[in-house]
Image (cartoon, rainbow, N blue to C red):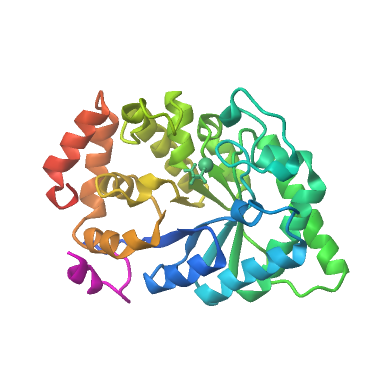
Amino acid sequence: ALAENEAYRGRPSVTADGAAVELAANIGSAEDAQQARRHDAEGVGLFRTEFLYMGRSSLPSEDEQYGAYRAAAEAMGSDRPVVIRTMDIGGDKELPLLELPREDNPFLGYRALRISLDRPELFKTQLRAILRAGAHGNVKVMFPMVATIGEWRRAKALLDEARAELLAEGRELGGPMEAGIMIEIPAAAMMADRLAREVDFFSIGTNDLVQYAMAADRMHPKLGALGDPLHPPVLRLIDRVIRAAHAEGKWVGMCGEMAGQPLAVPLLLGMGLDEFSMSSSAILGTRALLSRLSRTELAGLAAAALDLDSADEVRALVAARVPEAA
Ligand code: PEP
Ligand code: MG
Protein backbone atom coordinates (compact mmCIF):
# COMPACT_ATOMS: atom_id res chain seq x y z
CA ALA A 1 0.00 0.00 0.00
CA LEU A 2 2.93 2.33 0.73
CA ALA A 3 4.35 2.02 -2.79
CA GLU A 4 0.87 2.46 -4.17
CA ASN A 5 0.40 5.64 -2.14
CA GLU A 6 3.64 7.01 -3.60
CA ALA A 7 1.86 7.15 -6.95
CA TYR A 8 -0.26 9.97 -5.50
CA ARG A 9 2.70 12.24 -4.78
CA GLY A 10 2.42 15.51 -6.68
CA ARG A 11 -1.15 14.80 -7.65
CA PRO A 12 -4.13 16.96 -6.65
CA SER A 13 -6.44 15.66 -3.91
CA VAL A 14 -9.62 14.95 -5.85
CA THR A 15 -12.40 12.44 -5.53
CA ALA A 16 -13.52 10.07 -8.29
CA ASP A 17 -16.31 12.53 -9.12
CA GLY A 18 -13.96 15.50 -9.35
CA ALA A 19 -14.45 17.22 -5.97
CA ALA A 20 -11.21 18.87 -4.80
CA VAL A 21 -10.30 19.05 -1.12
CA GLU A 22 -7.14 20.20 0.67
CA LEU A 23 -5.01 17.66 2.51
CA ALA A 24 -2.93 19.55 5.05
CA ALA A 25 -0.56 18.68 7.87
CA ASN A 26 -0.60 19.24 11.61
CA ILE A 27 2.79 20.51 12.77
CA GLY A 28 4.40 21.56 16.06
CA SER A 29 7.54 23.29 14.76
CA ALA A 30 9.11 24.84 11.67
CA GLU A 31 11.11 21.61 11.16
CA ASP A 32 7.84 19.70 10.98
CA ALA A 33 6.89 21.92 8.04
CA GLN A 34 9.80 20.51 6.04
CA GLN A 35 8.57 17.03 6.89
CA ALA A 36 5.07 18.04 5.77
CA ARG A 37 6.44 19.14 2.39
CA ARG A 38 8.22 15.80 2.01
CA HIS A 39 4.87 14.10 2.56
CA ASP A 40 3.33 16.34 -0.10
CA ALA A 41 1.03 18.31 2.22
CA GLU A 42 -0.94 20.98 0.39
CA GLY A 43 -0.75 23.24 3.39
CA VAL A 44 -0.52 23.31 7.17
CA GLY A 45 -3.96 23.12 8.75
CA LEU A 46 -2.68 23.41 12.30
CA PHE A 47 0.62 24.79 13.62
CA ARG A 48 0.51 24.04 17.36
CA THR A 49 2.55 26.95 18.71
CA GLU A 50 2.45 26.03 22.39
CA PHE A 51 5.62 23.95 21.95
CA LEU A 52 7.51 27.22 21.43
CA TYR A 53 6.57 28.15 24.99
CA MET A 54 7.15 24.84 26.73
CA GLY A 55 10.23 23.44 28.46
CA ARG A 56 12.12 26.71 28.85
CA SER A 57 12.82 29.33 31.48
CA SER A 58 11.54 32.47 29.73
CA LEU A 59 8.74 33.32 27.32
CA PRO A 60 9.69 33.36 23.62
CA SER A 61 10.22 36.90 22.31
CA GLU A 62 8.35 38.37 19.35
CA ASP A 63 11.42 37.99 17.13
CA GLU A 64 11.98 34.39 18.12
CA GLN A 65 8.38 33.51 17.36
CA TYR A 66 8.49 35.46 14.12
CA GLY A 67 11.53 33.40 13.09
CA ALA A 68 9.72 30.12 13.70
CA TYR A 69 6.48 31.17 11.97
CA ARG A 70 8.34 32.65 9.03
CA ALA A 71 10.41 29.46 8.63
CA ALA A 72 7.23 27.37 8.53
CA ALA A 73 5.63 29.72 5.98
CA GLU A 74 8.74 29.66 3.80
CA ALA A 75 9.04 25.88 4.02
CA MET A 76 5.55 25.59 2.56
CA GLY A 77 6.17 28.14 -0.20
CA SER A 78 4.18 31.21 -1.09
CA ASP A 79 0.93 29.48 -2.11
CA ARG A 80 0.33 26.73 0.40
CA PRO A 81 -1.60 28.01 3.40
CA VAL A 82 -0.15 27.78 6.91
CA VAL A 83 -2.72 28.09 9.70
CA ILE A 84 -0.97 29.25 12.86
CA ARG A 85 -2.94 28.59 16.03
CA THR A 86 -2.29 30.90 18.94
CA MET A 87 -0.99 29.12 22.01
CA ASP A 88 -3.06 26.42 23.65
CA ILE A 89 -1.41 26.08 27.05
CA GLY A 90 -3.36 24.41 29.85
CA GLY A 91 -5.39 21.23 29.85
CA ASP A 92 -2.82 18.52 29.21
CA LYS A 93 -0.07 21.03 28.27
CA GLU A 94 1.55 22.61 31.30
CA LEU A 95 3.61 25.78 31.35
CA PRO A 96 5.34 26.14 34.75
CA LEU A 97 6.65 29.52 33.57
CA LEU A 98 3.22 31.13 33.91
CA GLU A 99 2.91 29.82 37.48
CA LEU A 100 -0.68 28.84 36.95
CA PRO A 101 -2.40 27.48 40.06
CA ARG A 102 -3.15 23.78 40.12
CA GLU A 103 -6.72 23.08 38.97
CA ASP A 104 -9.16 20.30 39.79
CA ASN A 105 -10.42 20.21 36.18
CA PRO A 106 -7.67 21.53 33.92
CA PHE A 107 -9.60 20.73 30.73
CA LEU A 108 -12.44 22.92 32.00
CA GLY A 109 -10.17 25.61 33.29
CA TYR A 110 -7.83 28.45 32.53
CA ARG A 111 -6.61 27.38 29.12
CA ALA A 112 -5.67 28.55 25.62
CA LEU A 113 -7.55 31.68 24.48
CA ARG A 114 -8.80 32.18 28.03
CA ILE A 115 -5.21 32.83 29.11
CA SER A 116 -4.44 34.87 25.99
CA LEU A 117 -7.39 37.24 26.56
CA ASP A 118 -6.47 37.57 30.22
CA ARG A 119 -2.81 38.37 29.38
CA PRO A 120 -3.09 40.69 26.35
CA GLU A 121 0.61 41.63 26.46
CA LEU A 122 1.54 37.98 26.02
CA PHE A 123 -1.12 37.51 23.34
CA LYS A 124 -0.18 40.59 21.35
CA THR A 125 3.45 39.55 21.24
CA GLN A 126 2.35 36.35 19.54
CA LEU A 127 -0.12 38.11 17.23
CA ARG A 128 2.55 40.57 16.10
CA ALA A 129 4.92 37.69 15.31
CA ILE A 130 2.23 35.89 13.29
CA LEU A 131 1.25 39.04 11.38
CA ARG A 132 4.88 39.74 10.50
CA ALA A 133 5.29 36.16 9.24
CA GLY A 134 2.39 36.93 6.89
CA ALA A 135 4.83 38.85 4.69
CA HIS A 136 6.59 35.57 3.85
CA GLY A 137 3.85 33.19 2.81
CA ASN A 138 0.17 32.38 2.91
CA VAL A 139 -0.30 32.67 6.69
CA LYS A 140 -3.66 32.51 8.46
CA VAL A 141 -4.28 32.89 12.19
CA MET A 142 -6.57 30.70 14.30
CA PHE A 143 -7.82 30.95 17.87
CA PRO A 144 -8.23 27.81 20.02
CA MET A 145 -10.95 27.01 22.57
CA VAL A 146 -13.47 29.68 21.58
CA ALA A 147 -16.65 29.19 23.65
CA THR A 148 -18.48 32.48 23.00
CA ILE A 149 -18.85 35.04 20.23
CA GLY A 150 -17.53 37.65 22.65
CA GLU A 151 -14.22 35.80 22.99
CA TRP A 152 -13.81 35.71 19.22
CA ARG A 153 -14.57 39.44 19.00
CA ARG A 154 -12.06 40.32 21.70
CA ALA A 155 -9.39 38.20 20.05
CA LYS A 156 -10.13 39.75 16.65
CA ALA A 157 -9.98 43.26 18.13
CA LEU A 158 -6.53 42.54 19.58
CA LEU A 159 -5.43 41.17 16.20
CA ASP A 160 -6.63 44.37 14.49
CA GLU A 161 -4.87 46.44 17.15
CA ALA A 162 -1.60 44.54 16.64
CA ARG A 163 -1.89 45.04 12.88
CA ALA A 164 -2.49 48.79 13.24
CA GLU A 165 0.54 49.09 15.54
CA LEU A 166 2.79 47.24 13.12
CA LEU A 167 1.63 49.39 10.22
CA ALA A 168 2.26 52.55 12.25
CA GLU A 169 5.79 51.27 12.89
CA GLY A 170 6.25 50.89 9.14
CA ARG A 171 6.60 47.10 9.27
CA GLU A 172 6.36 44.97 6.17
CA LEU A 173 3.14 42.88 6.40
CA GLY A 174 1.37 40.71 3.88
CA GLY A 175 -2.14 41.54 2.66
CA PRO A 176 -5.14 41.15 4.98
CA MET A 177 -4.76 37.94 6.98
CA GLU A 178 -7.58 35.42 7.26
CA ALA A 179 -8.61 34.86 10.88
CA GLY A 180 -10.54 31.80 11.98
CA ILE A 181 -11.42 29.78 15.02
CA MET A 182 -11.30 26.21 16.17
CA ILE A 183 -14.63 24.60 16.80
CA GLU A 184 -13.81 22.29 19.69
CA ILE A 185 -16.34 23.31 22.33
CA PRO A 186 -19.97 22.22 21.81
CA ALA A 187 -21.15 25.75 22.69
CA ALA A 188 -19.29 27.10 19.65
CA ALA A 189 -20.64 24.29 17.45
CA MET A 190 -24.17 25.23 18.47
CA MET A 191 -23.50 28.90 17.65
CA ALA A 192 -21.64 28.13 14.43
CA ASP A 193 -24.31 29.91 12.34
CA ARG A 194 -23.62 33.18 14.16
CA LEU A 195 -19.85 32.72 14.36
CA ALA A 196 -19.72 31.95 10.63
CA ARG A 197 -20.92 35.49 9.85
CA GLU A 198 -17.80 36.96 11.43
CA VAL A 199 -14.89 34.57 11.00
CA ASP A 200 -13.03 33.69 7.79
CA PHE A 201 -12.97 29.94 8.48
CA PHE A 202 -13.55 27.16 10.98
CA SER A 203 -11.32 24.23 11.85
CA ILE A 204 -13.03 21.48 13.81
CA GLY A 205 -10.91 20.16 16.67
CA THR A 206 -12.41 16.76 17.29
CA ASN A 207 -9.92 15.74 19.98
CA ASP A 208 -11.50 18.26 22.31
CA LEU A 209 -14.96 18.41 20.71
CA VAL A 210 -15.46 14.70 21.41
CA GLN A 211 -14.29 14.92 25.02
CA TYR A 212 -16.55 17.91 25.73
CA ALA A 213 -19.56 16.49 23.87
CA MET A 214 -19.29 13.07 25.49
CA ALA A 215 -18.04 14.33 28.89
CA ALA A 216 -15.16 11.87 28.67
CA ASP A 217 -11.56 12.94 29.41
CA ARG A 218 -9.57 12.44 26.19
CA MET A 219 -6.67 10.93 28.18
CA HIS A 220 -8.70 8.57 30.37
CA PRO A 221 -7.58 4.95 29.87
CA LYS A 222 -11.01 3.52 30.64
CA LEU A 223 -13.08 5.86 28.48
CA GLY A 224 -11.72 5.09 25.04
CA ALA A 225 -15.09 3.93 23.69
CA LEU A 226 -16.74 7.21 24.67
CA GLY A 227 -13.92 9.05 22.92
CA ASP A 228 -14.91 7.68 19.52
CA PRO A 229 -15.59 10.50 17.02
CA LEU A 230 -18.06 8.28 15.17
CA HIS A 231 -20.72 8.68 17.88
CA PRO A 232 -23.80 10.09 16.11
CA PRO A 233 -24.04 13.10 18.49
CA VAL A 234 -20.51 14.09 17.47
CA LEU A 235 -21.30 13.57 13.78
CA ARG A 236 -24.38 15.76 14.19
CA LEU A 237 -22.30 18.57 15.68
CA ILE A 238 -19.79 18.30 12.84
CA ASP A 239 -22.51 18.29 10.20
CA ARG A 240 -24.07 21.35 11.76
CA VAL A 241 -20.77 23.23 11.76
CA ILE A 242 -20.03 22.44 8.12
CA ARG A 243 -23.49 23.54 7.02
CA ALA A 244 -23.25 26.75 9.04
CA ALA A 245 -19.90 27.66 7.49
CA HIS A 246 -21.07 26.95 3.95
CA ALA A 247 -24.28 28.93 4.44
CA GLU A 248 -22.03 31.97 4.96
CA GLY A 249 -19.64 31.06 2.16
CA LYS A 250 -16.80 30.19 4.55
CA TRP A 251 -14.49 27.18 4.28
CA VAL A 252 -14.26 24.60 7.02
CA GLY A 253 -11.48 22.22 7.89
CA MET A 254 -10.77 19.65 10.56
CA CYS A 255 -7.52 19.32 12.47
CA GLY A 256 -8.45 16.71 15.08
CA GLU A 257 -7.24 13.11 14.72
CA MET A 258 -10.52 12.15 13.10
CA ALA A 259 -9.57 13.93 9.84
CA GLY A 260 -6.97 11.24 9.09
CA GLN A 261 -9.01 8.19 10.09
CA PRO A 262 -9.94 6.14 7.00
CA LEU A 263 -13.41 5.22 8.31
CA ALA A 264 -14.20 8.86 9.06
CA VAL A 265 -12.99 10.30 5.74
CA PRO A 266 -15.98 9.09 3.65
CA LEU A 267 -18.41 10.61 6.17
CA LEU A 268 -16.56 13.95 6.36
CA LEU A 269 -16.35 14.06 2.59
CA GLY A 270 -20.06 13.37 2.31
CA MET A 271 -20.78 16.19 4.76
CA GLY A 272 -18.77 18.58 2.59
CA LEU A 273 -15.60 19.17 4.63
CA ASP A 274 -13.18 21.34 2.61
CA GLU A 275 -9.84 20.74 4.32
CA PHE A 276 -8.49 17.69 6.18
CA SER A 277 -5.46 18.32 8.40
CA MET A 278 -3.61 15.33 9.81
CA SER A 279 -0.20 13.96 10.69
CA SER A 280 1.98 14.22 7.58
CA SER A 281 2.46 10.49 7.25
CA ALA A 282 -1.27 9.95 6.62
CA ILE A 283 -1.53 12.37 3.67
CA LEU A 284 -0.65 10.21 0.66
CA GLY A 285 -2.77 7.31 1.91
CA THR A 286 -5.73 9.63 2.39
CA ARG A 287 -5.24 11.03 -1.12
CA ALA A 288 -5.28 7.46 -2.49
CA LEU A 289 -8.49 6.71 -0.59
CA LEU A 290 -10.16 9.94 -1.76
CA SER A 291 -9.46 9.12 -5.38
CA ARG A 292 -11.74 6.07 -5.03
CA LEU A 293 -14.63 7.91 -3.37
CA SER A 294 -17.48 9.92 -4.82
CA ARG A 295 -18.55 12.95 -2.81
CA THR A 296 -22.02 12.95 -4.37
CA GLU A 297 -22.65 9.32 -3.40
CA LEU A 298 -21.28 9.83 0.10
CA ALA A 299 -23.69 12.67 0.92
CA GLY A 300 -26.36 10.00 1.34
CA LEU A 301 -24.08 7.85 3.49
CA ALA A 302 -23.35 10.78 5.82
CA ALA A 303 -27.05 11.57 6.15
CA ALA A 304 -27.76 7.91 7.00
CA ALA A 305 -25.01 7.87 9.64
CA LEU A 306 -26.54 10.88 11.42
CA ASP A 307 -29.68 8.83 11.84
CA LEU A 308 -28.07 5.82 13.53
CA ASP A 309 -28.06 5.02 17.26
CA SER A 310 -24.40 4.28 17.98
CA ALA A 311 -20.79 4.57 16.87
CA ASP A 312 -20.75 0.80 16.28
CA GLU A 313 -23.63 1.10 13.84
CA VAL A 314 -21.87 3.96 12.04
CA ARG A 315 -18.70 1.89 11.80
CA ALA A 316 -20.58 -1.08 10.37
CA LEU A 317 -22.40 1.11 7.86
CA VAL A 318 -19.23 2.73 6.53
CA ALA A 319 -17.34 -0.58 6.42
CA ALA A 320 -20.16 -2.19 4.45
CA ARG A 321 -20.69 0.66 2.00
CA VAL A 322 -17.05 1.76 1.58
CA PRO A 323 -14.90 -1.38 1.86
CA GLU A 324 -11.81 0.63 0.72
CA ALA A 325 -11.98 2.55 4.01
CA ALA A 326 -12.30 -0.46 6.30
C1 PEP B 1 -8.29 19.23 18.86
O1 PEP B 1 -8.72 19.51 19.98
O2 PEP B 1 -8.86 18.44 18.08
C2 PEP B 1 -7.03 19.82 18.36
C3 PEP B 1 -6.65 19.65 17.11
O3 PEP B 1 -6.28 20.54 19.24
P1 PEP B 1 -5.33 19.88 20.35
O4 PEP B 1 -5.27 18.40 20.04
O5 PEP B 1 -4.02 20.57 20.20
O6 PEP B 1 -6.05 20.19 21.60
MG1 MG C 1 -7.91 21.13 21.10
**137, above or below 193, in the image:** below
Where is residue 188 drawn, in percent x and y? 55, 34
Q: Quadrant of the N terminus?
A: bottom left
Front residue of 5 and 235: 5
Front residue of 198 and 89: 89
Where is residue 197 drawn, in percent x and y? 60, 44
- Residue 39 lies in quadrant: bottom left
**285, above or below 227, in the image:** below
Give the magenta-colored segment's residue range.
Answer: 1-14
Asked if residue 153 shows in the view, the reply is no
Is 11 magenta? The answer is yes
Residue occupying the point 63% across, 43% down? 89
**212, above or below 326, in the image:** above
- Residue 283 shown left or right of residue 59 in the figure: left
Where is residue 66 drawn, in percent x and y? 70, 67
Q: Main secondary structure of the magenta part?
A: loop
Asked if residue 262 shows in the view, the reply is yes
- Residue 146 lies in quadrant: top right
- Residue 260 shown left or right of residue 219 in the figure: left
Where is residue 14 drawn, in percent x and y? 29, 65
- Residue 163 shown left or right of residue 231 in the figure: right
How many marks on residues?
0
